[in-house]
Image (spheres, rainbow, N blue to C red):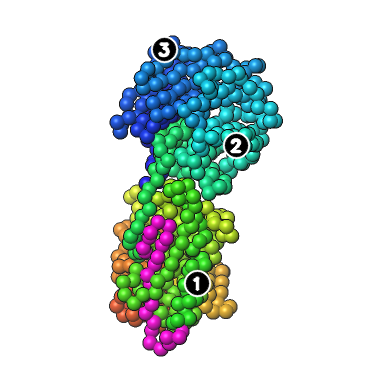
Amino acid sequence: MGWSGWFNIGAPAGGFNGGPATISRNKDVCNVYVRGNDNALWQRAWFANSWHPWGRHNDGGVLASEPALGSMGPDHEHVFVRGTDGNVWQKYWTRTGGWSGWFNIGAPAGGFSGGPATISRNKDVCNVYVRGNDGALWQRAWFANSWHPWARHNDGGALASDPALGSMGPDHEHIFVRGTDSNVWQKYWTQTGGWKGWFNIGAPAGGFSGGPATISRNRDVCNVYARGNDGALWQRAYFANSWHPWGRHNDGGVLASEPALGSMGPNHEHVFVRGTDGNVWQKYWVHEAEPTGEVSFGVSECVYNWTAAYHQSGTRVTVRIQLNPDAGISTATMDSLRTTWRNGIINTWSDRFSCLAPNGGRQSVTFDVQWVGSGAHHAVRVQPGPARSNMRLWDTSDTGDVAAHEFGHMLGHPDEYADAACPARSPVNTGTVMADNTETVARHYNRITGFHGSGHTPTAGASEPPEVFEEAAMTLKNIDALRPEPRAAVLQRLRGMAGSGAAPERAEETEVSFEVSGGAPGERYAYRLGVHGDGSAQRSVLDELLQGGNDETSQAVDRQLAGRVFQAAADAGLLDDSAPSVPEQQLEGEVLPDTMVAVITVRDGDALRRIAVPADEPANAPASLPGEPADIPLRTQIQLPADSVTALRPVLEALGAVEAAL
């Protein structure tokens, strides 16, 4: 299952002060405690598979801090608080005796700041820690059936928060604090080695508020959580004998307190926080059994839609591909290509990242390609190259990098390069395998590794380029999705650009354009011709298969010519009040990523209307386009369906006149 969402479990009558605390004394019980606004101890319990109402402890206790919780066994739990006298007070519960009263266990010499913290690493030991008023860590221990004196940790540690405590076994405990440098610092104790530390484990990007919290759901895993200065939950994990980077929980949660942590078993942990609404909110993580079997799902992005398919067994993914070469491609060539393509795919995708295994160890995410004659997940036509490729059309000049890119689509990943057919695509220009045939990054593994729940990190030697994405300059709006009044105003402005008179106000923000794009990275073709209402025009051509195949022109044309283009758009129905209907504009069936697509756009500022039609080069157009293919009156060899050319001819011819004038 991995992580759940956030759940609101309410608050005591009258509200509460600070943040919550939680303890699970066994796998069937979870208790949440808070300091009510009346300064009493309040509790909400989970048992018998449901939450039960908040209840007040009417025992006379007056809290001056949030409660600290611990358990010395499945039938015991205890609560420690700061009292109004500045001392630590304790009460405990046992199955046989119920709740005790409050006991004063004193305070360090010189007093302490904030509230206490507690940990019981086994059934015979309980340790209480506080931040002394001298900034040092102080400890009082219960063992051999009695409390022992408060003692100072004379290790140079200077605390800037209450301590957070955890244990990874009966002979281990560790302490995390905020240091005076605003990083998280750790020290730990083992039966054989005694105390070690302090160690600086850093802080989330942007820093964090308050102190850290920690939980170890089993002996191999330790998680540290903090409330980031952005209000989000951040986490750093220790597993496979090393610390892994801080990660942000991008789940929309906004914390108004430090997190409180608990575990109901070795494959479970949960987080409780105060929300901005004053209620307690919870999310939890449960280990999900490793998936095994065939995986198939639809992917849709802008005009593109296709089916991803593969076989998954835990962190092992296999894709069966059937290669169907065109006549004239030799067996020797295909054997060589299989080797090249498989190596490119495996080197790019496999053993680049690993994730947390059920036992707390690390499992590498691996990929394999099987070339099959039947029973394929994906059938790929192989044509002579050089040519332009898509997910199911490769060519003999394709490198292993191109194969790795198309393999990403087979796994369900959209492209990450800027594309006329997908102007709102995000992210773009990412510097990854889905943009320019380079590296994979962690998010490319999210779907496959989500069942682990603890994220995934680069394996040794795997590089992860910085994920710096190019943001769109504006938020684009679909004209046909606007309310009637603004839609009518936009269309009227665009119709007002027709004619030969002086350019209307803000004419430079209006445009009619024709674009074609397609092909995998390294083989891209992109043609664009656009004219604005004020007569400025731009033409650009990118052809990565040709040396020197890049061409850009930008200059003003006659205002009358610009007006003619807008008039032609109106004549073709592109500026009608209702959405236009152009033959073949609906790209039916699967439209594979990297496929050639043509787009005509009419735009006013950030509001636009787009007509997308299938397109292809003459060599492939008869087989790939619906109906008969036809040339278009522009300086590009790309063909469109004949019916689409007929419907759009006024616009295409007017744009052709603009192109001739450039």
Q: Quadrant of the C terminus?
A: bottom right
Please report whichever mark, 1 or 3, sits nearer to the chain's N-terminal start: 3
Q: Nearer the viewer, residue 325 or 623?
A: 325
Is residue 499 shown above or below 97?
A: below
Q: Is residue 54 left or right of residue 387?
A: left
Point 36% across, 63% down: residue: 311
Which is in the foreground here, disc 3 or disc 2? 2
User: Which residue does the numbered mark 1 point to in the structure image?
Assistant: 343
Please report whichever mark, 3 or 2, sits nearer to the chain's N-terminal start: 3
Measured in 3D between alpha carbons, the distance from the residue under mark 2 to the one under mark 1, in whole angstroms, is 48 Å
Residue 553 x, y percent position in the rendering: 56, 71
Q: Is residue 460 magenta?
A: no
User: Which residue does the numbered mark 3 point to in the structure image?
Assistant: 59
For this orientation, the residue located farthest to the bottom is: 328
Q: Residues within 10 Å of mark 1 (few under 14, many from 20)?
A: some
User: Which residue does the numbered mark 2 point to in the structure image?
Assistant: 192
Q: Is residue 515 visible?
A: no
Tags 2 and 1 in contact by the CB under 8 Å rule? no
Q: Is residue 162 visible?
A: yes
Q: Nearer the viewer, residue 29 or 595?
A: 29
**On the image, which quarter does residue 207 sit in?**
top right
- Judged from the image, the secondary structure of the residue bearing numbered disc 2 is loop
